[in-house]
Image (spheres, rainbow, N blue to C red):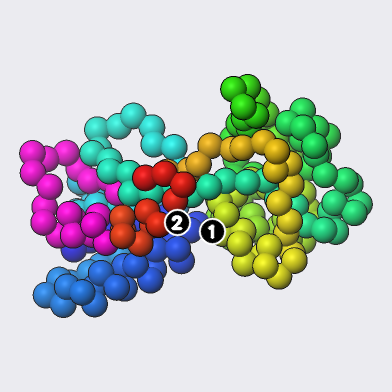
Amino acid sequence: MRIAGPASVGTLFAPALADFARRHPALQVHTRFSDQYVDLAAEGFDCAIRVGYMPDSSLIARKIGSLPMQLYASPGYIKENGAPQYPADILKHSAITAGTNSWVFSDGDQNFTVHPQGRFKADNAYVLAEAAASDLGVVAMGEMIAGPYVETGRLVPIMTRFRMPDVGIFVVRPPSQHIPRKVRLLIDLLVEKFAAVSTSS
């Protein structure tokens, strides 16, 4: 079974994939973790794990969970620059981002979209976390990734009055009439692992 996954958060899924191989000893499990686009059908993958907001595509996607998102900064950055209190304040701060993305916040039935600006960008969630922990700016990331940094005091949640949309965890596969049994088994295991830590599934 060939499975593609995102390198930027690959360590989140490594224990689950190892457990999958342990539970099904008759399967050969080959994984590729990369943040480059993978053409599942052309490259012979049975399925892929994707994290984010799923765009429209020809792939069949099954949501297996979600990652709560929050804004974070280091104590050192906050001491030097203060912390944003409202979405508009973010434009006065250096943001650490994965690219030219926008951040969406909600307060009750009001939504606010911000286009953060900063000099440090990366396509890997742990690189973003390290940059934020090194006082380079504010960052939006999943609580599962930020958790160890918060526990050690290197990052603190900020602007907690405002919610950010959860990021979805999906298993995607090439279109076909019937889902292969091995893919169904993987989906069942990932739901078991990640639904419990999601705010929705």
Find disc 2 in the rendering and name its residue.
197
Q: Residue at x 29, y 73 (%)?
A: 19
Could you say whether the residue bearing mark 1 is in a helix, strand or loop?
A: helix
Between marks 2 and 1 in the image, the one whose residue lies nearer the viewer? 2
In percent of width and height, residue 194 lies at: 38, 57
Amino acid residing under circle 2? Val
Q: Work out how far the residue at label 2 is from the one at label 1, CA to CA, in angstroms.
A: 9 Å
Residue in the foreground of this view, choosing between 199 and 9: 199
Q: Is residue 188 magenta?
A: yes
- Asked if 170 appears above or below 15 in the picture, the reply is above
Residue in the foreground of this view, choosing between 83 and 26: 83
Q: Which residues are magenta?
A: 169-189
In percent of width and height, residue 16 lies at: 34, 67
Find disc 1 in the rendering and name its residue.
144
Q: Residue at x 91, y 52 (%)?
A: 80
In percent of width and height, residue 110 lies at: 63, 22
Q: Residues within 10 Å of mark 1 (few under 14, many from 20)?
A: some
In percent of width and height, residue 136 lies at: 78, 53
